[in-house]
């Protein structure tokens, strides 16, 4: 990102703030389930922020893969995992755990 006014940065901040409203270290799975049954409209909001987050994480993953294919240096965890043939985490796992 070239500046603090970058549209992608604004999207990331907005989406991650939305995700933080759905997640909490003090919230249990039971509480989340009861909340989603009681307030089904919140599920739509959660799905929206998940889809929006997937959009930019897919963009970033594509950029990392492109740099790996070009032989460029990658100094990030995802790049290191994707380049390591013996890594126990693979792309499918990285995608599964992104939200």
Image (spheres, rainbow, N blue to C red):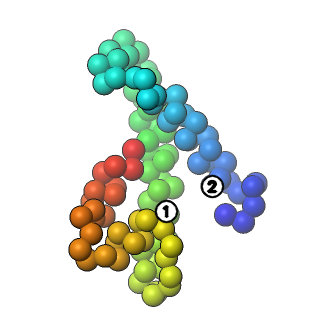
Q: Is residue 79 above or below residue 41?
A: below
View extreme (top): residue:
38
Identify whether 97 is placed above or below 25.
below
Q: Secondary structure at mark 2?
A: helix
For the point 40% across and 26% down, the residue is 43
**First in residue order: circle 2 vs circle 1:** 2
* Category of crowding for the residue at label 1, using alpha-carbon neighbours closer than 10 angstroms: few (below 14), some (14–19), many (at least 20): few
Can you say which quadrant of the picture contains the N terminus? bottom right
Left or right: residue 2 versus residue 19 is right
Q: Are marks 2 and 1 in contact (CB under 8 Å)?
A: yes
63 left or right of 85? Answer: right
Q: Secondary structure at mark 1?
A: helix
Image x and y of residue 81, in percent? 35, 69
Compute the Cα span from label 2 to label 1. 10 Å
Q: How many marks?
A: 2
Q: For residue 16, what is the image quadrant?
A: top right
Front residue of 20/86: it is 86
**Residue 59, horizontal then vertical, whole percent:** 49, 62
Mark 2 neighbour class, 10 Å CA radius: few under 14, some 14 to 19, many 20 or more: few
Q: Residue at x 44, y 44 (%)?
A: 51
Residue at 28% of width from left, 56% of height from top? 93
Residue of label 1: 59
Q: Residue 34 appears at what percent x and percent y?
A: 32, 15
Identity of the residue drawn at 41% across and 36% down: 47
Report the residue marked by disc 2: 8
Quadrant location, the C terminus:
top left
């Amino acid at each position: 990102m070239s500046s603090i006014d970058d549209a992608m940065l604004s999207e990331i901040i907005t989406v991650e703030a939305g995700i933080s409203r759905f997640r909490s270290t003090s919230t249990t799975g039971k509480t989340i389930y009861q909340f989603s049954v009681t307030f089904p409209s919140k599920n739509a909001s959660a799905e929206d922020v998940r889809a929006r987050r997937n959009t930019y994480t897919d963009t970033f993953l594509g950029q990392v893969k492109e740099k790996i294919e070009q032989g460029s240096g990658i100094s990030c965890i995802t790049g290191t995992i994707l380049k390591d043939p013996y890594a126990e985490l693979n792309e499918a796992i990285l995608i599964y755990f992104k939200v």
